[in-house]
Image (spheres, coloured by chain):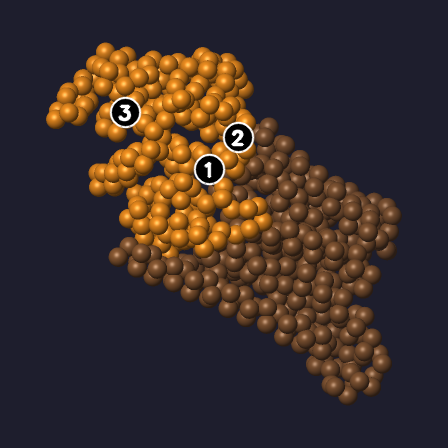
Amino acid sequence: MISKRLDRLNRTYNRQRQGYHKRLALLAASLVVFTFLSLLFGRYPSVGFVSLDSLLNDPLMGKIVVNIRMPRIILAILGGASLAAAGFVFQMLFANPLVEPGFLGVSQGAAFGAAAVIVFYGYSSFYVQLSATFFALLALYLSYRIAHRFRFGGWILRLVLSGIAVGAIFSSLLSVVKVLADPTTSLQEITFWMMGGLYNSTWERAVSVIPTMMISLIVLFSVRWRINLLSLPDRTGHTLGLSVVRERIILLIVATVATTSIISVAGLVSWVGLIVPHLARRLFTSDSRYSLAGSMMLGALFLLISDTLGRTLLSSEIPLGIITSLFGAILFIFILSSRQSGVKL
Amino acid sequence: MNTDAYTLHHVSFRYPTNALLALDNLSVRITKGRTTALLGPNGAGKSTLMDILLAYKQPSQGSVTLFGTPLNDFSKKELGKNVGLVPQDERSRFSFSSIEYVLFGRSPYVEYMKNPGKEDIEIAYDSLERVGMAQLAHRPSTTLSGGEHQLLLLARVLAQQPKVILLDEPTSSLDPGNTARVLQILSSLKKRGITLLITTHDPSIAADIGDEVVMLKEGSLLYSGSVKEGCTDERLTALYDTPLQTIQHEGKLIITR
């Protein structure tokens, strides 16, 4: 009797899992389709899809597809996956569905680090990435240490408050850098860069960040089940055999590195890390075994579509960050207003 | 043969922000295979002692052994296989289904970069069945009632299959029906030789399910030994600073004010 019942439950479980796998496969297939569509869609020679004739006979068209669109699309896909995965990990590790790396000063630290290099050294993908990562980790470390010193509120609140303070400090420092910037050259570059965009993607830039993003994504994906456990209270995690603090710090560093890699080439692309994990939890479950992979794919799709729209809708480029903010905020309102938000706030 | 699950030698603990000792020179033995109630008023140091037994906090002084081995010699994973916790209150903000939640108990058995396997999933379903919650296996845990959630935490520790289970006020938020169910599950665990340590500020619960009792007051040991001998009118009155009486009824100890 009991074993029959367990058998039935087991079958339901497997059916559910198959359902999640199917959805993941569907997302992967859409990603492939959108990648091809996006490669062939643009404003040269006129708005619309490339004709086969021009692809084969127009040498400039071939160059545009291979040297301009392709690296840009790869960056959009990996960048979207990185931002969404990092947001997902931050939300789980802080047991707070309303955070993303912008909280804890990570994005502001990265922005300051990148801007400082642009102004005082000139744009170099490697140094921008290095400096952005350094200051993002510094901000993360400061937020963590300062939260320990606060004598007000619970741990999550203390962390949010110290993150706000550290974020504000780096935002102020960023303003100082802007004041010092040359208004005719680097100030413009910083301003446009801060709006977020992949407009100057090249193979060189793509290659400089692809390895870090890939490694970060693989590391996060391989520990996906444990991310669930790290969302539980510390004491519970400890009794379940986890080295809670160590595992949390490692994953936060990996998530931060993933974020700064894309920030260093695309500037501040906000809302992806906040909104996409919510969408993933609705499509799958809160279980990171499925929702983390779901977040990565949805993030990739979200950024790919946003970027394609940004470069084709108007004759001049709409910065990517503006499009993601617009769609992200609308989706956010929609998700939090619906009954099945997948989280309890 | 060592009959102790835990042996505490002169254990003291002080919080960095507090001048007073939270635990003061505690020497106690928790007997293997028996149910021990950890009894004391609020703020007596029960939670601190639990944290030390879980190796979640380190004593400022003294030593703790588990089955004769110093607690700190256990790896995190080994500790997870030996000692399980049923916290008093634990709610996730994320809507894991009940079965996913119970599956977390398998963590000490799952390799670092692996996911739980078929056997883990079967054990998790079996654990849910044993607390009578199999029909809620695929419901989001965020929609469970307080009582159901407490049973879910119990199912998770069953899936963890530890030799010692620490329970923090396991019945404090339960209605009489669910309390009876929890006590029944605990007594079946006891029959299987599991060592149970239950904190409670309610002496009736201690008298009902405990074989032995450890009484703590202001961080110091007031008594440790059998429940029957320990739960006297004078001792309970001294423990709670309020007049309490014990009555024997059909072999059961009942405590009244």
Q: Which residue is mark 1?
A: B81
Q: Please report contact status of discs 1 and 3: CB closer than 8 Å, yes or no.
A: no
Chain of the residue displaying label 2? B
Describe residue A79's horizontal placement relative to residue B7 as left or right.
right
Are labels 1 and 3 assigned to the same chain?
yes
Q: Examine the rendered structure and indicate whether residue B9 appears above or below residue A237.
A: above
- Chain that is coloured brown in the picture: A
- For residue B211, the mark is 3
| Cα separation between marks 1 and 3 | 24 Å
- Residue found 86% across the figure and 55% down from its top: A184
Which of the pair B81/A105 is nearer the observer?
Answer: B81
Q: Earlier in the sequence, mark 1 or mark 2?
A: 2
Residue A219 visible at all? yes
Residue B236 visible at all? no
Q: Colour of chain B?
A: orange
- Identify the image quadrant of residue B216: top left
Amino acid type for the residue under numbered disc 1? Lys
Q: Which residue is mark 2?
A: B74
Disc 3 element: loop
| Cα separation between marks 3 and 2 | 27 Å
- Residue found 64% across the figure and 42% down from its top: A250
Q: Position of residue A216 (x, y in %)?
A: 67, 52
Describe residue A182's horizontal placement relative to residue A93 as left or right.
right
Q: Examine the rendered structure and indicate whether residue A184 appears above or below residue B3.
A: below
Q: Residue furthest bottom?
A: A53
Q: Examine the rendered structure and indicate whether residue B232 appears above or below residue B190.
A: above
Amino acid type for the residue under numbered disc 2? Phe
Which of the pair B215/B186 is nearer the observer?
Answer: B186
Chain of the residue displaying label 3? B
